Amino acid sequence: MLNTVKEGWTTFKSIFTGMGVTMRHLFGPSVTLQYPDEKMELPKGARAKLYVNIDDCIGCNLCARACPVNCIDIETVAATSDVDLGKTSTGNPKRFWLTRFNIDMAKCMYCDLCVYPCPTDCIYMVPEYEYSEFDRSGLVYHFSNLKPEMVAEVKEKAEKEAAEKKRQKEEMMRKKAEEKKRKELEKQKLEANKSIKEDDSSSKPENNDS
Amino acid sequence: MIEGFINNLPMITILVHAAIPLTIILVYALVAIWGERKIAGFIQDRLGPMRVGGWHGWAQSIADLLKLIQKEDILPKDASRFLFRFAPFMMFAASYAAFAVIPFSSSYIGSNINIGVFYLLAVTSVLTLSVIMAGWASNNKWSLLGGMRSAAQMVSYEVPTIATVLTVIVVSGSLNLMTVTEMQSGNDILGFLPNWFIFQNPFLIVAFIIFFISILAESHRVPFDLPESESELVAGYQTEYSGMRWAMFMLAEYADMLLLSLLGAVLFFGGWNSPFGEFMGGPAWGFFWFMLKGLLLVFVMMWIRWTLPRYRVDQLMHICWSILIPLSFINLVLVALWEVIFN
Protein backbone atom coordinates (compact mmCIF):
# COMPACT_ATOMS: atom_id res chain seq x y z
CA MET A 1 0.00 0.00 0.00
CA LEU A 2 2.73 2.44 1.06
CA ASN A 3 4.78 1.30 -1.90
CA THR A 4 1.91 2.00 -4.27
CA VAL A 5 1.51 5.51 -2.87
CA LYS A 6 5.23 6.11 -3.22
CA GLU A 7 5.18 4.78 -6.75
CA GLY A 8 2.22 6.94 -7.61
CA TRP A 9 3.96 9.97 -6.19
CA THR A 10 7.12 9.36 -8.28
CA THR A 11 4.99 8.71 -11.34
CA PHE A 12 3.11 11.97 -11.03
CA LYS A 13 6.26 13.87 -10.14
CA SER A 14 8.10 12.58 -13.21
CA ILE A 15 5.08 13.18 -15.45
CA PHE A 16 4.80 16.79 -14.32
CA THR A 17 8.54 17.31 -14.63
CA GLY A 18 8.38 15.99 -18.18
CA MET A 19 5.37 18.12 -18.99
CA GLY A 20 7.17 21.15 -17.60
CA VAL A 21 10.06 20.50 -19.93
CA THR A 22 7.81 20.11 -22.96
CA MET A 23 5.87 23.25 -21.99
CA ARG A 24 9.10 25.23 -21.84
CA HIS A 25 10.00 24.00 -25.29
CA LEU A 26 6.49 24.70 -26.58
CA PHE A 27 7.11 28.40 -26.09
CA GLY A 28 10.84 28.28 -26.66
CA PRO A 29 12.47 29.36 -29.89
CA SER A 30 12.49 26.94 -32.80
CA VAL A 31 15.72 25.79 -34.38
CA THR A 32 14.16 25.23 -37.79
CA LEU A 33 15.54 27.10 -40.77
CA GLN A 34 12.93 27.63 -43.47
CA TYR A 35 15.40 26.23 -45.95
CA PRO A 36 14.66 27.52 -49.42
CA ASP A 37 13.62 30.88 -47.98
CA GLU A 38 16.43 31.30 -45.50
CA LYS A 39 19.76 29.56 -45.64
CA MET A 40 22.43 28.81 -43.14
CA GLU A 41 25.67 30.69 -43.68
CA LEU A 42 28.37 28.16 -44.45
CA PRO A 43 31.45 28.27 -42.24
CA LYS A 44 34.62 29.86 -43.54
CA GLY A 45 36.57 27.44 -45.68
CA ALA A 46 33.54 25.32 -46.51
CA ARG A 47 34.16 23.14 -49.54
CA ALA A 48 31.02 23.25 -51.60
CA LYS A 49 31.80 24.05 -55.23
CA LEU A 50 34.94 24.85 -57.19
CA TYR A 51 35.15 28.15 -58.96
CA VAL A 52 37.82 29.48 -61.31
CA ASN A 53 38.41 33.17 -61.80
CA ILE A 54 39.41 32.66 -65.40
CA ASP A 55 40.75 36.23 -65.79
CA ASP A 56 43.53 35.40 -63.37
CA CYS A 57 44.39 31.98 -64.71
CA ILE A 58 47.78 31.69 -66.38
CA GLY A 59 47.18 28.16 -67.63
CA CYS A 60 50.02 26.63 -65.66
CA ASN A 61 48.18 23.32 -65.23
CA LEU A 62 49.29 22.95 -61.59
CA CYS A 63 45.74 22.42 -60.31
CA ALA A 64 45.06 19.73 -62.87
CA ARG A 65 48.23 17.95 -61.86
CA ALA A 66 47.39 18.23 -58.17
CA CYS A 67 43.92 16.74 -58.62
CA PRO A 68 43.84 13.14 -57.32
CA VAL A 69 40.75 12.21 -59.36
CA ASN A 70 41.59 14.09 -62.56
CA CYS A 71 38.46 16.13 -62.60
CA ILE A 72 40.15 19.26 -63.96
CA ASP A 73 40.69 19.30 -67.71
CA ILE A 74 42.78 22.16 -69.11
CA GLU A 75 43.85 22.86 -72.68
CA THR A 76 46.08 25.82 -73.43
CA VAL A 77 47.34 27.41 -76.60
CA ALA A 78 50.39 29.64 -76.56
CA ALA A 79 49.64 33.23 -77.31
CA THR A 80 51.04 34.55 -80.58
CA SER A 81 53.59 37.32 -80.47
CA ASP A 82 51.17 39.90 -81.94
CA VAL A 83 48.79 39.75 -78.93
CA ASP A 84 49.40 40.71 -75.38
CA LEU A 85 47.14 38.85 -72.95
CA GLY A 86 48.07 41.22 -70.17
CA LYS A 87 48.78 40.40 -66.61
CA THR A 88 46.77 38.79 -63.84
CA SER A 89 45.70 40.79 -60.83
CA THR A 90 48.64 39.30 -58.98
CA GLY A 91 51.06 40.58 -61.63
CA ASN A 92 51.91 37.33 -63.36
CA PRO A 93 52.09 37.69 -67.15
CA LYS A 94 49.59 35.56 -69.07
CA ARG A 95 51.15 33.64 -71.90
CA PHE A 96 48.45 31.14 -72.85
CA TRP A 97 45.02 31.19 -74.31
CA LEU A 98 42.80 28.97 -72.15
CA THR A 99 40.85 27.15 -74.81
CA ARG A 100 39.39 24.65 -72.36
CA PHE A 101 39.04 24.71 -68.58
CA ASN A 102 36.47 22.12 -67.46
CA ILE A 103 35.86 20.91 -63.92
CA ASP A 104 33.71 17.81 -63.46
CA MET A 105 32.03 18.32 -60.08
CA ALA A 106 30.59 14.80 -60.31
CA LYS A 107 34.13 13.49 -59.97
CA CYS A 108 35.36 16.10 -57.53
CA MET A 109 35.93 14.77 -54.03
CA TYR A 110 36.27 18.18 -52.37
CA CYS A 111 39.83 17.60 -51.14
CA ASP A 112 40.82 21.22 -51.76
CA LEU A 113 44.24 20.07 -53.09
CA CYS A 114 43.89 22.06 -56.29
CA VAL A 115 43.47 25.32 -54.42
CA TYR A 116 46.89 25.56 -52.81
CA PRO A 117 49.23 25.05 -55.80
CA CYS A 118 47.64 27.88 -57.79
CA PRO A 119 50.19 30.66 -58.15
CA THR A 120 47.56 33.33 -58.76
CA ASP A 121 44.92 32.04 -56.30
CA CYS A 122 42.34 31.90 -59.06
CA ILE A 123 40.83 28.47 -58.25
CA TYR A 124 38.94 28.23 -54.99
CA MET A 125 35.81 26.84 -53.29
CA VAL A 126 32.68 28.97 -53.20
CA PRO A 127 29.89 28.47 -50.64
CA GLU A 128 27.29 27.37 -53.15
CA TYR A 129 25.79 23.94 -52.69
CA GLU A 130 22.56 23.89 -54.68
CA TYR A 131 23.72 22.55 -58.02
CA SER A 132 22.09 19.17 -58.41
CA GLU A 133 21.38 18.16 -61.99
CA PHE A 134 19.20 15.63 -63.75
CA ASP A 135 22.09 14.60 -65.97
CA ARG A 136 25.64 13.95 -64.88
CA SER A 137 27.01 15.93 -67.78
CA GLY A 138 25.37 19.00 -66.25
CA LEU A 139 27.91 18.82 -63.45
CA VAL A 140 30.79 19.57 -65.81
CA TYR A 141 31.48 23.26 -65.46
CA HIS A 142 33.08 25.14 -68.32
CA PHE A 143 35.12 28.08 -67.12
CA SER A 144 36.87 29.07 -70.33
CA ASN A 145 35.33 32.26 -71.66
CA LEU A 146 36.69 31.92 -75.18
CA LYS A 147 34.11 31.54 -77.91
CA PRO A 148 34.42 28.43 -80.13
CA GLU A 149 35.27 30.47 -83.25
CA MET A 150 37.80 32.39 -81.19
CA VAL A 151 39.30 29.11 -80.07
CA ALA A 152 39.61 27.97 -83.67
CA GLU A 153 41.15 31.30 -84.70
CA VAL A 154 43.59 31.26 -81.83
CA LYS A 155 44.59 27.71 -82.60
CA GLU A 156 45.07 28.45 -86.26
CA LYS A 157 47.12 31.50 -85.45
CA ALA A 158 49.20 29.60 -82.97
CA GLU A 159 49.75 26.82 -85.48
CA LYS A 160 50.76 29.30 -88.14
CA GLU A 161 53.12 31.00 -85.80
CA ALA A 162 54.51 27.69 -84.70
CA ALA A 163 54.95 26.69 -88.31
CA GLU A 164 56.55 30.05 -89.04
CA LYS A 165 58.82 29.65 -86.11
CA LYS A 166 59.67 26.16 -87.19
CA ARG A 167 60.36 27.40 -90.67
CA GLN A 168 62.47 30.22 -89.31
CA LYS A 169 64.27 27.84 -87.08
CA GLU A 170 64.87 25.48 -89.93
CA GLU A 171 66.06 28.37 -92.01
CA MET A 172 68.33 29.41 -89.23
CA MET A 173 69.54 25.92 -88.94
CA ARG A 174 70.05 25.76 -92.66
CA LYS A 175 71.79 29.11 -92.63
CA LYS A 176 73.91 27.99 -89.78
CA ALA A 177 74.67 24.80 -91.60
CA GLU A 178 75.47 26.73 -94.75
CA GLU A 179 77.67 29.07 -92.82
CA LYS A 180 79.39 26.16 -91.31
CA LYS A 181 79.82 24.58 -94.69
CA ARG A 182 81.10 27.81 -96.14
CA LYS A 183 83.45 28.29 -93.31
CA GLU A 184 84.63 24.78 -93.67
CA LEU A 185 85.03 25.31 -97.37
CA GLU A 186 86.96 28.46 -96.75
CA LYS A 187 89.06 26.64 -94.30
CA GLN A 188 89.66 23.93 -96.81
CA LYS A 189 90.45 26.54 -99.41
CA LEU A 190 92.82 28.22 -97.10
CA GLU A 191 94.40 24.96 -96.28
CA ALA A 192 94.55 24.13 -99.97
CA ASN A 193 96.15 27.48 -100.71
CA LYS A 194 98.58 26.90 -97.96
CA SER A 195 99.46 23.55 -99.34
CA ILE A 196 99.78 25.05 -102.79
CA LYS A 197 102.06 27.66 -101.44
CA GLU A 198 103.97 25.02 -99.66
CA ASP A 199 103.98 23.05 -102.86
CA ASP A 200 105.18 26.10 -104.59
CA SER A 201 107.95 26.64 -102.18
CA SER A 202 108.87 23.01 -102.26
CA SER A 203 108.53 22.69 -105.98
CA LYS A 204 110.43 25.79 -106.64
CA PRO A 205 113.69 24.22 -106.33
CA GLU A 206 112.34 21.35 -108.33
CA ASN A 207 111.17 23.82 -110.84
CA ASN A 208 114.43 25.46 -110.54
CA ASP A 209 115.93 22.13 -110.97
CA SER A 210 113.97 21.48 -114.04
CA MET B 1 -38.22 27.75 -29.97
CA ILE B 2 -36.62 24.57 -31.28
CA GLU B 3 -39.68 22.52 -30.33
CA GLY B 4 -41.80 24.82 -32.45
CA PHE B 5 -39.59 24.34 -35.46
CA ILE B 6 -39.68 20.60 -35.13
CA ASN B 7 -43.47 20.68 -35.14
CA ASN B 8 -43.57 22.77 -38.30
CA LEU B 9 -40.84 21.29 -40.50
CA PRO B 10 -39.92 17.99 -38.92
CA MET B 11 -37.49 16.45 -41.41
CA ILE B 12 -35.44 19.51 -42.34
CA THR B 13 -35.15 20.69 -38.76
CA ILE B 14 -34.05 17.31 -37.57
CA LEU B 15 -31.44 17.16 -40.32
CA VAL B 16 -30.13 20.62 -39.48
CA HIS B 17 -30.18 19.72 -35.83
CA ALA B 18 -28.19 16.57 -36.51
CA ALA B 19 -25.74 18.32 -38.82
CA ILE B 20 -24.58 20.82 -36.20
CA PRO B 21 -22.36 18.38 -34.26
CA LEU B 22 -21.09 16.95 -37.54
CA THR B 23 -20.02 20.42 -38.68
CA ILE B 24 -18.35 21.00 -35.33
CA ILE B 25 -16.52 17.65 -35.54
CA LEU B 26 -15.30 18.23 -39.08
CA VAL B 27 -14.07 21.76 -38.46
CA TYR B 28 -12.55 20.67 -35.18
CA ALA B 29 -10.79 17.71 -36.84
CA LEU B 30 -9.21 19.95 -39.47
CA VAL B 31 -8.04 22.41 -36.84
CA ALA B 32 -6.99 19.77 -34.33
CA ILE B 33 -4.91 17.72 -36.76
CA TRP B 34 -3.12 20.86 -37.85
CA GLY B 35 -2.88 21.98 -34.23
CA GLU B 36 -1.48 18.69 -33.07
CA ARG B 37 1.24 18.82 -35.70
CA LYS B 38 2.02 22.39 -34.73
CA ILE B 39 2.17 21.53 -31.04
CA ALA B 40 4.34 18.51 -31.79
CA GLY B 41 6.62 20.76 -33.79
CA PHE B 42 6.89 23.45 -31.16
CA ILE B 43 7.51 20.96 -28.37
CA GLN B 44 10.32 19.45 -30.40
CA ASP B 45 11.71 22.92 -31.23
CA ARG B 46 10.53 22.63 -34.82
CA LEU B 47 7.92 24.68 -36.64
CA GLY B 48 5.53 22.00 -37.87
CA PRO B 49 3.73 22.45 -41.19
CA MET B 50 4.57 25.88 -42.59
CA ARG B 51 4.01 25.98 -46.33
CA VAL B 52 0.47 24.99 -47.33
CA GLY B 53 -1.93 27.92 -47.44
CA GLY B 54 0.49 30.68 -46.56
CA TRP B 55 0.03 31.57 -42.92
CA HIS B 56 1.78 28.90 -40.83
CA GLY B 57 0.50 26.10 -43.05
CA TRP B 58 -3.11 26.46 -41.92
CA ALA B 59 -4.40 24.53 -44.95
CA GLN B 60 -2.28 21.45 -44.24
CA SER B 61 -5.21 19.31 -43.09
CA ILE B 62 -7.25 20.28 -46.15
CA ALA B 63 -4.34 19.34 -48.40
CA ASP B 64 -4.01 16.03 -46.54
CA LEU B 65 -7.71 15.39 -46.98
CA LEU B 66 -7.47 16.05 -50.73
CA LYS B 67 -4.56 13.64 -50.90
CA LEU B 68 -6.46 10.95 -49.00
CA ILE B 69 -9.47 11.31 -51.32
CA GLN B 70 -7.25 10.59 -54.32
CA LYS B 71 -5.75 7.47 -52.80
CA GLU B 72 -6.57 3.98 -53.95
CA ASP B 73 -9.08 2.13 -51.82
CA ILE B 74 -7.14 -1.04 -51.13
CA LEU B 75 -8.95 -4.17 -49.98
CA PRO B 76 -6.65 -7.02 -48.85
CA LYS B 77 -7.17 -10.24 -50.78
CA ASP B 78 -8.14 -12.44 -47.86
CA ALA B 79 -9.97 -9.77 -45.88
CA SER B 80 -13.54 -10.14 -44.83
CA ARG B 81 -14.99 -7.77 -47.36
CA PHE B 82 -18.11 -6.53 -45.63
CA LEU B 83 -16.62 -6.13 -42.15
CA PHE B 84 -13.49 -4.52 -43.53
CA ARG B 85 -15.52 -1.90 -45.37
CA PHE B 86 -18.00 -1.38 -42.59
CA ALA B 87 -15.67 -0.98 -39.58
CA PRO B 88 -14.43 2.61 -40.13
CA PHE B 89 -17.92 3.96 -40.69
CA MET B 90 -19.25 2.15 -37.65
CA MET B 91 -16.45 3.65 -35.59
CA PHE B 92 -17.24 7.17 -36.70
CA ALA B 93 -20.97 6.61 -36.34
CA ALA B 94 -20.42 5.56 -32.73
CA SER B 95 -18.47 8.71 -31.89
CA TYR B 96 -20.89 10.90 -33.77
CA ALA B 97 -23.96 9.37 -32.20
CA ALA B 98 -22.60 10.13 -28.75
CA PHE B 99 -22.53 13.85 -29.55
CA ALA B 100 -26.34 13.83 -29.50
CA VAL B 101 -26.45 14.22 -25.72
CA ILE B 102 -23.68 16.80 -25.37
CA PRO B 103 -25.13 20.21 -24.40
CA PHE B 104 -23.15 22.54 -26.64
CA SER B 105 -24.88 25.64 -25.35
CA SER B 106 -27.78 26.55 -23.11
CA SER B 107 -30.07 26.55 -26.15
CA TYR B 108 -28.65 23.64 -28.12
CA ILE B 109 -28.51 19.98 -27.25
CA GLY B 110 -29.05 17.29 -29.85
CA SER B 111 -31.34 15.20 -27.72
CA ASN B 112 -32.34 16.28 -24.25
CA ILE B 113 -32.89 12.80 -22.87
CA ASN B 114 -32.89 11.86 -19.20
CA ILE B 115 -30.33 9.06 -19.53
CA GLY B 116 -27.77 11.18 -21.37
CA VAL B 117 -24.57 9.95 -19.73
CA PHE B 118 -25.73 6.36 -19.81
CA TYR B 119 -26.53 6.64 -23.51
CA LEU B 120 -23.15 8.25 -24.19
CA LEU B 121 -21.18 5.51 -22.41
CA ALA B 122 -23.28 2.80 -24.04
CA VAL B 123 -22.83 4.16 -27.54
CA THR B 124 -19.08 4.75 -27.19
CA SER B 125 -18.62 1.11 -26.23
CA VAL B 126 -19.45 0.32 -29.87
CA LEU B 127 -16.04 1.84 -30.64
CA THR B 128 -14.40 -1.23 -29.13
CA LEU B 129 -16.47 -3.42 -31.36
CA SER B 130 -15.51 -1.53 -34.50
CA VAL B 131 -11.82 -1.65 -33.60
CA ILE B 132 -11.97 -5.42 -33.17
CA MET B 133 -14.00 -5.64 -36.35
CA ALA B 134 -11.32 -3.74 -38.28
CA GLY B 135 -8.53 -5.81 -36.77
CA TRP B 136 -10.26 -9.12 -37.43
CA ALA B 137 -11.45 -8.30 -40.93
CA SER B 138 -7.99 -7.18 -42.07
CA ASN B 139 -6.73 -10.77 -41.75
CA ASN B 140 -3.37 -9.53 -40.57
CA LYS B 141 -1.74 -10.62 -37.35
CA TRP B 142 -0.63 -7.13 -36.35
CA SER B 143 -4.07 -5.75 -36.96
CA LEU B 144 -5.64 -8.50 -34.95
CA LEU B 145 -3.15 -7.99 -32.12
CA GLY B 146 -3.92 -4.28 -32.17
CA GLY B 147 -7.63 -4.97 -32.16
CA MET B 148 -7.33 -7.41 -29.24
CA ARG B 149 -5.20 -5.00 -27.25
CA SER B 150 -7.67 -2.27 -27.94
CA ALA B 151 -10.57 -4.41 -26.80
CA ALA B 152 -8.80 -5.36 -23.59
CA GLN B 153 -7.82 -1.77 -22.97
CA MET B 154 -11.18 -0.19 -23.66
CA VAL B 155 -13.15 -2.76 -21.71
CA SER B 156 -10.79 -2.33 -18.75
CA TYR B 157 -10.75 1.44 -18.76
CA GLU B 158 -14.48 1.70 -19.19
CA VAL B 159 -14.76 0.61 -15.55
CA PRO B 160 -12.88 3.55 -13.96
CA THR B 161 -14.49 5.94 -16.45
CA ILE B 162 -17.95 4.81 -15.45
CA ALA B 163 -17.02 4.80 -11.75
CA THR B 164 -15.82 8.42 -11.93
CA VAL B 165 -18.80 9.48 -14.00
CA LEU B 166 -20.89 7.86 -11.32
CA THR B 167 -19.25 10.00 -8.64
CA VAL B 168 -20.42 13.09 -10.49
CA ILE B 169 -23.86 11.59 -10.90
CA VAL B 170 -23.94 11.00 -7.14
CA VAL B 171 -23.40 14.74 -6.65
CA SER B 172 -25.72 15.93 -9.40
CA GLY B 173 -28.46 13.35 -9.03
CA SER B 174 -29.24 13.44 -12.74
CA LEU B 175 -28.08 11.58 -15.84
CA ASN B 176 -29.23 14.40 -18.10
CA LEU B 177 -26.15 16.36 -19.14
CA MET B 178 -28.17 19.55 -19.60
CA THR B 179 -29.38 19.32 -16.01
CA VAL B 180 -25.88 18.51 -14.83
CA THR B 181 -24.61 21.68 -16.54
CA GLU B 182 -27.41 23.85 -15.21
CA MET B 183 -26.60 22.69 -11.68
CA GLN B 184 -23.14 24.20 -12.03
CA SER B 185 -24.31 27.76 -12.81
CA GLY B 186 -23.38 30.62 -10.51
CA ASN B 187 -20.31 31.72 -8.60
CA ASP B 188 -20.84 30.85 -4.96
CA ILE B 189 -17.85 28.78 -3.85
CA LEU B 190 -15.61 30.90 -1.58
CA GLY B 191 -17.46 33.90 -2.94
CA PHE B 192 -15.88 33.95 -6.39
CA LEU B 193 -15.20 30.44 -7.71
CA PRO B 194 -17.77 29.11 -10.17
CA ASN B 195 -20.05 26.33 -8.93
CA TRP B 196 -18.28 23.71 -11.02
CA PHE B 197 -18.18 20.23 -9.62
CA ILE B 198 -14.40 20.18 -9.56
CA PHE B 199 -14.44 22.97 -6.96
CA GLN B 200 -17.39 21.64 -5.00
CA ASN B 201 -15.77 18.64 -3.45
CA PRO B 202 -12.09 17.73 -2.91
CA PHE B 203 -12.75 14.10 -3.84
CA LEU B 204 -14.07 15.19 -7.21
CA ILE B 205 -10.57 16.48 -8.03
CA VAL B 206 -9.29 12.93 -7.51
CA ALA B 207 -12.24 11.72 -9.56
CA PHE B 208 -11.27 14.09 -12.36
CA ILE B 209 -7.67 12.87 -12.40
CA ILE B 210 -8.84 9.25 -12.65
CA PHE B 211 -11.40 10.25 -15.29
CA PHE B 212 -8.75 12.04 -17.34
CA ILE B 213 -6.35 9.08 -17.25
CA SER B 214 -9.18 6.76 -18.27
CA ILE B 215 -10.29 8.91 -21.19
CA LEU B 216 -6.70 9.04 -22.40
CA ALA B 217 -6.82 5.25 -22.53
CA GLU B 218 -10.30 5.15 -24.02
CA SER B 219 -9.44 7.44 -26.89
CA HIS B 220 -6.16 5.56 -27.53
CA ARG B 221 -3.94 8.50 -26.76
CA VAL B 222 -0.34 8.32 -25.62
CA PRO B 223 0.73 6.94 -23.15
CA PHE B 224 -1.99 4.35 -23.76
CA ASP B 225 -1.86 4.14 -27.56
CA LEU B 226 -1.17 0.41 -27.61
CA PRO B 227 -3.84 -0.47 -30.18
CA GLU B 228 -2.02 1.49 -32.86
CA SER B 229 1.52 1.58 -31.49
CA GLU B 230 3.47 2.34 -34.63
CA SER B 231 6.76 0.94 -33.46
CA GLU B 232 5.45 -2.47 -32.46
CA LEU B 233 2.28 -3.17 -34.41
CA VAL B 234 2.96 -0.99 -37.48
CA ALA B 235 -0.34 0.80 -36.92
CA GLY B 236 -2.43 -1.87 -35.22
CA TYR B 237 -5.92 -2.25 -36.59
CA GLN B 238 -5.34 0.56 -39.14
CA THR B 239 -2.48 -1.20 -40.93
CA GLU B 240 -4.45 -2.48 -43.91
CA TYR B 241 -6.56 0.62 -44.39
CA SER B 242 -5.84 3.32 -46.93
CA GLY B 243 -7.35 6.49 -48.30
CA MET B 244 -10.69 7.65 -47.01
CA ARG B 245 -11.34 4.55 -44.93
CA TRP B 246 -8.24 5.28 -42.95
CA ALA B 247 -9.28 8.94 -42.79
CA MET B 248 -12.55 7.81 -41.19
CA PHE B 249 -10.56 6.10 -38.44
CA MET B 250 -8.52 9.22 -37.94
CA LEU B 251 -11.64 11.37 -37.85
CA ALA B 252 -13.33 9.01 -35.40
CA GLU B 253 -10.29 9.06 -33.19
CA TYR B 254 -10.22 12.84 -33.07
CA ALA B 255 -13.98 12.98 -32.62
CA ASP B 256 -13.68 10.54 -29.74
CA MET B 257 -11.01 12.70 -28.18
CA LEU B 258 -13.25 15.75 -28.42
CA LEU B 259 -16.28 13.84 -27.17
CA LEU B 260 -14.57 12.61 -24.04
CA SER B 261 -12.97 16.00 -23.40
CA LEU B 262 -16.36 17.66 -23.74
CA LEU B 263 -17.83 15.08 -21.39
CA GLY B 264 -15.10 15.97 -18.92
CA ALA B 265 -15.90 19.65 -19.38
CA VAL B 266 -19.59 19.01 -18.70
CA LEU B 267 -19.03 16.78 -15.69
CA PHE B 268 -16.27 18.71 -13.94
CA PHE B 269 -15.91 22.17 -15.46
CA GLY B 270 -19.45 23.43 -15.71
CA GLY B 271 -20.12 22.79 -19.40
CA TRP B 272 -21.29 25.97 -21.11
CA ASN B 273 -21.22 28.06 -17.91
CA SER B 274 -19.02 31.14 -18.03
CA PRO B 275 -16.30 31.22 -15.38
CA PHE B 276 -17.41 34.81 -14.61
CA GLY B 277 -21.01 34.08 -13.69
CA GLU B 278 -23.45 36.23 -15.64
CA PHE B 279 -20.65 38.13 -17.38
CA MET B 280 -20.09 36.77 -20.90
CA GLY B 281 -23.05 34.41 -20.44
CA GLY B 282 -25.79 33.55 -22.93
CA PRO B 283 -26.07 30.83 -25.58
CA ALA B 284 -23.35 32.11 -27.95
CA TRP B 285 -20.82 32.74 -25.20
CA GLY B 286 -21.90 29.44 -23.68
CA PHE B 287 -20.85 27.65 -26.85
CA PHE B 288 -17.56 29.52 -26.79
CA TRP B 289 -16.82 28.62 -23.16
CA PHE B 290 -17.84 25.02 -23.70
CA MET B 291 -15.61 24.54 -26.73
CA LEU B 292 -12.79 26.37 -24.97
CA LYS B 293 -12.94 24.00 -22.02
CA GLY B 294 -13.14 20.97 -24.30
CA LEU B 295 -10.28 22.12 -26.51
CA LEU B 296 -8.18 22.90 -23.45
CA LEU B 297 -8.52 19.29 -22.35
CA VAL B 298 -7.73 18.19 -25.92
CA PHE B 299 -4.64 20.37 -25.75
CA VAL B 300 -3.54 18.70 -22.51
CA MET B 301 -4.00 15.34 -24.23
CA MET B 302 -1.75 16.47 -27.08
CA TRP B 303 0.73 17.91 -24.62
CA ILE B 304 0.91 14.58 -22.80
CA ARG B 305 1.24 12.78 -26.11
CA TRP B 306 4.44 14.61 -26.96
CA THR B 307 5.84 14.19 -23.46
CA LEU B 308 5.36 10.61 -22.36
CA PRO B 309 6.45 7.28 -23.82
CA ARG B 310 4.06 4.36 -24.21
CA TYR B 311 3.21 1.93 -21.44
CA ARG B 312 3.65 -1.80 -21.79
CA VAL B 313 0.53 -3.95 -21.98
CA ASP B 314 1.04 -5.40 -18.49
CA GLN B 315 1.71 -1.92 -17.04
CA LEU B 316 -1.45 -0.67 -18.71
CA MET B 317 -3.51 -3.41 -17.15
CA HIS B 318 -1.76 -2.97 -13.80
CA ILE B 319 -2.59 0.73 -13.72
CA CYS B 320 -6.21 0.06 -14.55
CA TRP B 321 -7.08 -2.98 -12.45
CA SER B 322 -4.93 -2.56 -9.39
CA ILE B 323 -4.82 1.25 -9.04
CA LEU B 324 -7.49 3.15 -10.90
CA ILE B 325 -10.46 0.84 -10.32
CA PRO B 326 -10.01 0.43 -6.53
CA LEU B 327 -9.21 4.11 -6.19
CA SER B 328 -12.23 5.19 -8.18
CA PHE B 329 -14.58 3.00 -6.14
CA ILE B 330 -13.12 4.20 -2.83
CA ASN B 331 -13.47 7.71 -4.17
CA LEU B 332 -17.08 7.06 -5.09
CA VAL B 333 -17.83 6.04 -1.52
CA LEU B 334 -15.99 9.06 -0.13
CA VAL B 335 -17.85 11.46 -2.42
CA ALA B 336 -21.13 9.88 -1.39
CA LEU B 337 -20.20 10.26 2.30
CA TRP B 338 -19.20 13.90 1.73
CA GLU B 339 -22.54 14.53 0.08
CA VAL B 340 -24.43 12.90 2.94
CA ILE B 341 -22.49 14.83 5.60
CA PHE B 342 -22.23 18.33 4.09
CA ASN B 343 -25.32 18.63 1.91
Image (tube, coloured by chain):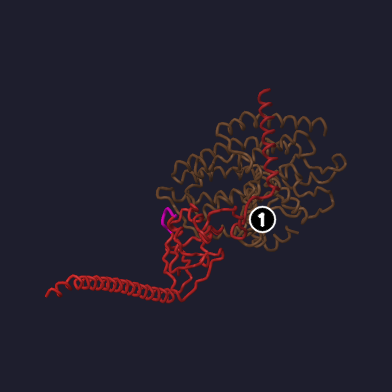
Indicate the position of residue B268 as horizontal and vertical percent values.
Answer: 74, 42
Look at the image and tell me in which quarter the C terminus of chain B lies: top right
Name the quadrant containing residue B328: top right
User: Dot 1 corresponds to which residue?
Assistant: B24
Q: Main secondary structure of the magenta part?
A: loop
How many marks are shown on the rendered structure? 1
Figure chain in brown = B
Q: Residue furthest front?
A: A209
Please tell me whether residue A68 belongs to the stretch shown in magenta.
Answer: yes
Q: Nearer the viewer, residue A177 or A139?
A: A177
Q: Position of residue B255 (x, y in %)?
A: 62, 50
Amino acid at circle 1:
Ile
Q: Nearer the viewer, residue B43 or A130?
A: A130
Chain letter, red in picture: A
Q: In which quadrant is the N terminus of chain B drawn?
A: bottom right
The subunit letter for the residue under badge 1 reads B
Q: Is residue B284 magenta?
A: no
Span highlighted in magenta in the image:
A66-71
The vertical placement of B265 against B49, above or below, is above
Identify the residue shown where x is 70% and y is 63%: B8
| Whole-percent x, y for residue B87 in the image | 51, 49
Q: Is residue B111 visible?
A: yes
Q: Is residue A166 left or right of residue B216?
A: left
Position of residue B232 relative to residue B251, above or below, is above
Residue positioned 79% across, 31% down in the render? B340
Residue B12 % position (x, y): 65, 62
SS assignment at label 1: helix
In this view, A210 is above or below B58 = below
